Amino acid sequence: MAKHRSFKLEKFIKGVNSDLLKAYFTWHNIPVAEGFVFSIDNIHDFLDGITDDGLRSYVEEELHCINDIADRARNYLEQAVRDYSIEVQEDEPSETTAMRVFLHGEEAFSLAYDYYLFVVYSEKLSHHKFDHNNCNFADDRIALLKSAIEQHFKDTGKSEHCDVRWRSNGDKHIVLVAHGDFMKTHLIFESSKVEIKSFRPAKEDMLVFDSNNCVLSVNTSGRSDVDKKKYIEIFGNAILGMDQIDESTFNNMLVVLDPIKDGSFSYSGNNDVDSVHLTEVRVKCRGSRVIRVAIGCGDVPQALSDLGLSLQDSEYVSAKLRFYIKRSGKKPKSITIEIKPPENTKLPEKAEKGIIESYLRDNGVLLT
């Protein structure tokens, strides 16, 4: 399960309703004493009392996941509440709502979890623009997409079966793929002796197609580009009806750093942005490896000069920008993004995303 680092069990226990937590453990056939009230003072002792180590690990992982959805995908929890007519209390904590959705059933929680993955994986995507947009999302085309993805992982020896889910979010069509990876072996200690255990790791990938600009965005769990290229080919064939994908789709230049390098990028802000600071660039000079340059003075040429590097001979590989978003009556909100041509932007899936994308587009960095 995709996780982030903010999980603190004490915070989760404080936010979730104790009766719902009791129902959760009872659902897992873990007994809870009559009248027991969960609190930050007793939760660790309670978990320590679960004698089945495998069950305890699974429960802790699941609680972590429920917490993350509460933290990162509140809007989608509310969508699940609406779609499945789940009763909630006014102004209840997100942790309590997330537990209600979980206990309601697999379909409701799957909806919230899939959109949580959309939020998490959207922070780092590669983008690929197709030449035409004859998209067809009919049931038979989606079925073709799913079967082709499953066949790909069978052919590569990674997975006999895949879990491919399809969601829509406005003009964005989301494909989430859970699949296996190559088999691994590990030494484990069991029954007072060392054993060899083989297992197949699980991986999760995401495709997002924006029907407005005909761009397919891909997040793959592996480091190899093989799966990414195959996803693009499968999607183009199944959904866009393309027999062959143009090479430019694989190598599109969708973001560029030229405005930052030549000084035409505006850091002064606009109606929504208070200011923008360049905090880091990665550059490659002739005959040298890629180096990271932290920008403290706000002057890139000066920073490079201090290192004895020539601006003209330097190829910009990536850059980090810190945006200060205006907020009425509050201090501007700071959000840092990473831009890495030709196709990659690391941009948080937050309410401010549209503001940042528009700013980058107006300044010639985002080309779509």
Image: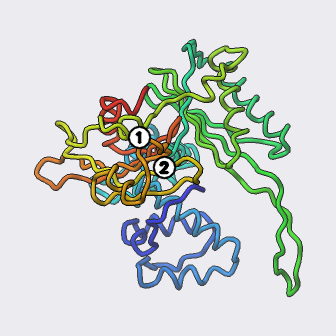
Q: Position of residue 198 (x, y in %)?
A: 86, 63
| 235 sits left or right of 18 in the view | right
Q: Position of residue 84 (x, y in %)?
A: 46, 40
Q: Nearer the viewer, residue 145 or 321?
A: 321
Numbered circle sitting on residue 168: none
Please report contact status of discs 2 and 1: CB closer than 8 Å, yes or no. Answer: no
- Report which residue position mark 2 lands on: 283
Write the residue at 31% across / 32% down.
Answer: 363
Neighbour class for label 2 at 10 Å: few (<14), some, many (≥20)? Answer: many
Tell me the amino acid under the disc marked 1: Gln
Residue highlighted by disc 1: 79
> Would you place residue 342 above or below residue 304 in this image?
above
Residue 282 % position (x, y): 47, 51
Name the image colouring: rainbow
For the C terminus, the image quarter is top left
Q: Secondary structure at mark 2?
A: strand
Q: Residue at x 71, y 53 (%)?
A: 202
Q: Kindly indicate the quadrant of the structure image that contains residue 160.
A: top right
* Placement of 58 over or under 302, stated as above or below: below
> In whole angstroms, how far apart are the C-alphas of marks 2 and 1?
44 Å
Residue 6 appearing in the image: yes
Q: Quadrant of the N terminus?
A: bottom right
Label 2 vs label 1, nearer the camera: 2
Q: In this orientation, which residue lies closer to the viewer: 76 or 361?
A: 361
Q: Which badge, 2 or 1, comes first in the chain's sequence?
A: 1
Camera-nearest residue between 233 and 299: 299
Give the residue at x 34% y 35%.
Answer: 360
As drawn, the residue found furthest toward the left would be 329
Relative to 91, 198 lies left or right = right
| Place of residue 273 in the rendered image (x, y in percent of width and height, measured from the top left) | 22, 42
